[in-house]
């Protein structure tokens, strides 16, 4: 049976195409991927913009190019796939393999991982972030439109050694390594299109460049900061300076690859449109190469309507307050007039509130965020008092030119908001001891009375160093919460404290409770970094 809000949605134009929200597998990766600039930006783009630069150095480093290093990281992780055994691929096993000779110049990997640690979480695996690095680098360099999928699972140890192609490999060894990973001869040649950006560092490969200085960076083509076909055309017309073509025999692997079929494949893909489409197909295959036990999601397209940073709060007056934001995708990258957005919510019994809630468009940074695939408007939900709680809401989007109203109802489910357990940010805090050291995290939650809810608990994700790996393990620590105080408002407050290792001060935490029949209610994925600094635990 449809909910009353779903029935109400039928009275206006209804729309659905997004996945059903929330989705812990997709939501965080979609945020990071689709909103890379502007308001509420993830900032992944900052690591490779502009294409020819190395922004991580602060002042820039002309001997390095982050976009090519991010793409190289994805290739070195993917190529150790064993197609016959169904193991390896983009699984972040590379975090254990950076000291191998086949991964010479490993600073490109460690710096890529270091940047992506900003986004590494219980909902965004390092292997998904490696794929995102390739997606972002290629698209930002005007390359083919790769798509992101989610669901990659990080390996728990290194993969077998010897699978990465090296400049010194002869053609038979190169063919064998690519075949082991599931790529044939034509695939191997096409995959070398990634050498349209970047180059070879002489300090790591002096036998290739003929110059061992730290500043030596021999580009693959004359347009190393643009994803174009020059790496192919300059090779074919004899003007190439690609060091992996011009190096002495035995260190010229690109020449061996291109020439392995008499230049047939590289000629066929040398025209600009063909180069981009061919390269897009092979690079997409590369980042989607995963162990056979992993099932990737469909391509993550930008959602039309998405709640963002929703938070209930039990006030000291006994009232429930809802805060948060609504993100709306523009269908023409922000060229048309901004629509108006309102909420229609149902209380915890399903009764619809008769008054629509107006939202306020953001004005900072034009009120928009953007990515490679879309531009979004952001709207702030005013601090709404909910006299009888909330169960879900629909979103009304009205075209200000035509007056057409479209109702988004989350595929008939409404956008759910549970009020059985509520994370209480004002009564939570992260306190560092004087003089430094491990901070103390205090989490407080309000649990609804009369619902037979038991075992109020918290989870916190602790970043735990691993031997011989450059990325920590994410370990979920769980502990019960203790009674803090009762209220006359139909809620009881519980609290707990946990000493976080200082390296984990910026992490995520959940509060949860068990209901009848083993049902679990949670207020999850709360960032701890916002609980530090001037934020103090307040009395209720």
Image: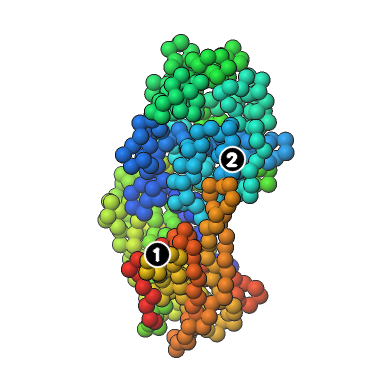
Q: Choose between 342 and 53: the one closer to the eye.
A: 53
Q: Choose between 494 and 513: the one closer to the eye.
A: 494
In percent of width and height, residue 404 lies at 36, 55
Residue at x-position 68% and y-position 47%: 293
Residue closest to the far bottom: 488
Label 2 sits on a secondary structure element that is: loop
Using residue 506 as the reference point, say whether residue 449 is left or right of it.
right
Using residue 497 as the reference point, say whether residue 530 is left or right of it.
left
Q: Choose between 434 and 176: the one closer to the eye.
A: 434
Number of other residues with Cα within 10 Å of mark 2, as a class: few under 14, some 14 to 19, many 20 or more? many
Q: How is the image coloured?
A: rainbow
Q: Are marks 2 and 1 in contact (CB under 8 Å)?
A: no
In this rendering, the answer to whether 307 lies above or below 50 is below
- Disc marking residue 436: 1
Q: In which quarter of the image is residue 87?
A: top right
- Disc marking residue 332: none
| Residue behind mark 2 | 97
Mark 2 vs mark 1: in front: 1
Residue closest to the far front: 435
Residue at x-position 66% and y-position 20%: 172
In percent of width and height, residue 361 lies at 30, 58
Label 1 sits on a secondary structure element that is: loop
């Amino acid at each position: 049976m449809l909910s009353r809000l779903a029935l109400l949605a039928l009275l206006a134009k209804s729309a659905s195409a997004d996945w059903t929200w929330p989705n812990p597998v997709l939501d965080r990766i979609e945020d990071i991927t689709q909103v890379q600039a502007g308001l509420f930006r993830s900032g992944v783009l900052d690591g490779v913009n502009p294409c020819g630069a190395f922004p991580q150095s602060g002042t820039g480093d002309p001997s390095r190019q982050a976009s090519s290093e991010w793409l190289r990281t994805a290739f070195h992780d993917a190529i150790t796939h064993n197609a016959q055994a169904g193991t390896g691929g983009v699984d972040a096993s590379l975090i254990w393999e950076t000291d191998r000779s086949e991964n010479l110049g490993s600073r490109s990997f460690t710096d890529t991982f270091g940047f992506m640690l900003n986004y590494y979480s219980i909902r965004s695996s390092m292997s998904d972030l490696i794929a995102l690095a390739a997606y972002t680098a290629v698209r930002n360099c005007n390359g083919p439109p790769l798509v992101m999928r989610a669901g990659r699972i990080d390996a728990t140890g290194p993969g077998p050694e010897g699978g990465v192609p090296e400049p010194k490999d002869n053609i038979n060894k190169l063919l064998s390594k690519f075949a082991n990973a599931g790529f044939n001869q034509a695939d191997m040649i096409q995959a070398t299109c990634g050498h349209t950006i970047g180059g070879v560092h002489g300090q790591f490969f002096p036998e290739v460049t003929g110059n061992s200085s730290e500043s030596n960076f021999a580009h693959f083509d004359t347009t190393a900061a643009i994803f174009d076909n020059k790496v192919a055309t300059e090779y074919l017309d004899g003007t190439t300076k690609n060091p992996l073509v011009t190096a002495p025999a035995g260190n010229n692997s690109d020449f061996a690859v291109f020439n392995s079929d008499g230049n047939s494949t590289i000629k066929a893909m040398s025209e600009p449109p063909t180069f981009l489409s061919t390269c897009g197909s092979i690079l997409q295959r590369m980042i989607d190469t995963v162990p056979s036990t992993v099932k990737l999601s469909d391509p993550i397209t930008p959602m039309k309507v998405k709640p963002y940073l929703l938070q209930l709060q039990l006030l000291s007056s006994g009232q429930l307050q809802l805060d948060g934001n609504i993100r709306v995708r523009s269908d023409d990258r922000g060229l048309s007039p901004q629509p108006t957005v309102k909420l229609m919510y149902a209380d915890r019994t399903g009764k619809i509130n008769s008054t629509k809630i107006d939202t306020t468009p953001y004005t900072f940074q034009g009120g928009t965020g953007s990515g490679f695939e879309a531009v979004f408007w952001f709207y702030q939900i005013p601090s709404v008092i909910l006299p009888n709680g909330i169960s879900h809401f629909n979103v009304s989007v009205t075209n200000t030119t035509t007056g057409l109203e479209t109702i988004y109802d989350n595929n008939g489910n409404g956008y759910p908001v549970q009020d059985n357990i509520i994370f209480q940010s004002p009564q939570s805090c992260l306190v560092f001891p004087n003089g430094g050291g491990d901070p103390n995290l205090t989490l407080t939650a309000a649990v609804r009375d009369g619902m037979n809810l038991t075992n109020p608990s918290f989870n916190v994700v602790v970043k735990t160093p691993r031997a011989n790996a450059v990325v920590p393990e994410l370990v979920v620590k769980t502990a019960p919460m203790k009674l803090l105080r009762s209220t006359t408002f139909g809620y009881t407050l519980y609290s707990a404290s946990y000493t976080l290792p200082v390296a984990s001060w910026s992490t995520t935490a959940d509060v949860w409770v068990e209901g009848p029949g083993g049902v679990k209610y949670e207020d999850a994925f709360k960032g701890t970094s916002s609980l530090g600094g001037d934020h103090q635990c307040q009395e209720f």
